[in-house]
Each structure stands twice: as structure tokens, then as C-alpha cells.
Image: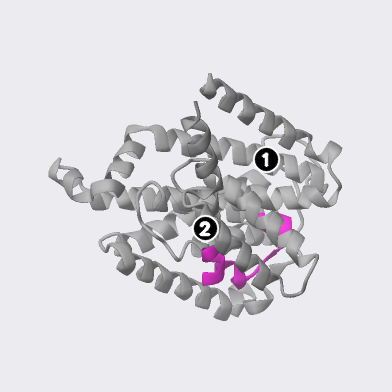
Amino acid sequence: MKSAIIVGALLLTVVLLIALPWYAPYFYIFIGTEILIMGLFAASFNLVFGYTGMLSFGHAAFFGIGTYATAMLLLHLQWPLLACLAVSMGVGALLALVIGFMSVRLNEVYFAMLTLAFGMMVFSIAHMWRSVTNGSDGIAGFTLGEFGLGIDLTLGNPAVYYHVVLGIVIVAALVLYLICRSSFGMTLQAIRQNAERVSFCGLNIRNYRLAAFTISGAFAGLAGGMMAPFLRVASPEMMHWSTSAEPVLMSILGGTGYFLGPFVGSALFVLLETWITSITQAWMLFLGIVLALMVMFFRRGILGTFLDWWLDKK
């Protein structure tokens, strides 16, 4: 009975998200687009953190390189959006493979610090390689052309682009969910709980961690690829360590032990930031206080705490 209610709630949420441009103020179309993109970014990070037990502080590198890939392809080659996003996924996965190959052999804080170091190296390259990335000014001035597959869409319309992002995020989330529910995903959870026992079973822990890190980088690159047309710019700030902190906060806010936790955390984070900035200029102070209170009193995240309470309720 309760599982049927959860499925019904998910379907209702999807229907409400599809209908958002028809009942919500125009401003919330932009907010909804940002929540979806950042939610996918946080979900990609949670594959590494929540399922595999590796805390990465350099995930913005994959997000940022996906942003740059889409922006440069749109600016110089005018490729269809779908082709640009496919390349964004590819370069995100490739960068994650390279960084992961050198990082997954380390554990806990050493892994976190090494990913942070690599992330800041990528940020520095994007900031200093002006002939390619245009430095701190970033890449702008590109236009959205075709969607691809012969589908005629007016991507410059925010409502149309919102629906495109929603469709891509739903498909990507389903793929991530299937990965998490597969034997591969179950092995990742076993590694998080006790890597030593898994290694005793004859499995190569590093290969599994590297595969998870590479898949995570691919979906982070996809999220970054969708952010470029949304913001109409790709800048080095998207690779900064502060951007890497956002999916960490979103995953913890929503609940790392639940697949939809990062999406809930993304909605909370973006809405809180939007509402607080409209009230005070000291928004970072108040946002920090609110986030600290949520983390202190909702140890399993907002979604995790609610589901634990509801499922245990007789």
C-alpha cells in the first residue's frame, strides 16, 4: 500500500513538473530549470558518495568541462543540442576516467583532497588558457539552433527549453536508477559498507570505484552541458571548488541514502537561495544558518527523515 502511494506521488510530481509553465509565474520556469540541472549534477555526485562511499571535492571539473564543450560546439560548429550533450557526457567521462585512475587507489580524506587538487588544476587551466576558454570572461555569444533527430523546437523559448531539460533529466535519472539497482550498483553499496570483505570475494575494488567515478563524471558532464544554454555562458567559476560543494550540500540535504534525495536537496537549496537573496543582501549568512539547522536536525536528510518516519509509522 505504501509503495503504491510513493509511486503515485512520483507520478503526480512528474505531472506537476510537466505542467509548471502553465500554472506557475514565468520566473519559476527558470528556477525549475536550474533545480533540474543541479539535481542531476547532485545525483551524479551521489553515485560516488552515497552509493560508493567516496567523497569527491572536484566534481565541478566534470560539470564545467561539459559546459565548455557544449558552449564551444554551439559557438564554433553550431551543432544540434543533442550532439553537444553527447559530447559533454563523453568529455566528462574521459576527464573522470583520467582523474579517477589516479585517485581511486586512495581512501577517505586522501581521496577527497586529491580530487579537490585535480579540480582546482582544471579550474586554473580554464582560467589561464585564454586562447581557448577566453579566461575569466568565459565563452558567450553562442545561439541555440536545432534540437536534433529532426525535431523542430524553439529552444530559445524558456518554457520549451525547460521541457527539454525535464525530459533529458527524467531519462538520465532512470538510467542512473537502473545502474544503482543493478548488480553493479549493489556491489558499489557493498564496497561502501565494507570494502575489505568485498575484496575477499575476489572483486577488484579499484575497478568498481573507477567505473562508478567515470559514470558519475559522464552524468555531471551532461548536467553541465545543459547549463551552458541555460545561462548562455560557460565560465571558469563553474569549475571552482565552491561549485563542487553544491552537490555535496544538496545530497546531504535531501538524503544520500535515497536515490531521489539529491533532487529534493537541489530544490531546497535553489529555492532557499532564491527566497533569501530576495530578502537580504546577507543571504549567505542566513542560508548557512538554515542549512546548518537542517543538517543538525535532519540527520538522514529531508527526504530520508520523512520516509523513515512515514514508513515506520503504523
- x then y, percent, for residue 171: 58, 35
Residue 295 badge: 2
Q: Is residue 64 visible?
A: no
Q: Quadrant of residue 270?
A: bottom right
Asked whether residue 242 is drawn in magenta, I would say: yes
Q: Residue at x 33, y 67 (%)?
A: 109
Q: Residues within 10 Å of mark 2 (few under 14, many from 20)?
A: some
- x then y, percent, for residue 24: 84, 42
Q: Nearer the viewer, mark 1 or mark 2?
A: 2
Q: Nearer the viewer, residue 73 or 224?
A: 224
Q: Residue at x 76, y 66 (%)?
A: 277
Q: Dot 1: what SS?
A: helix
Q: Nearer the viewer, residue 207 or 147?
A: 207
The extreme bottom residue here reads: 128
Q: Is residue 113 visible?
A: yes
Region in magenta: 227-245
Q: Residue at x 79, y 47 (%)?
A: 29
Q: Is residue 8 above or below residue 138?
A: above
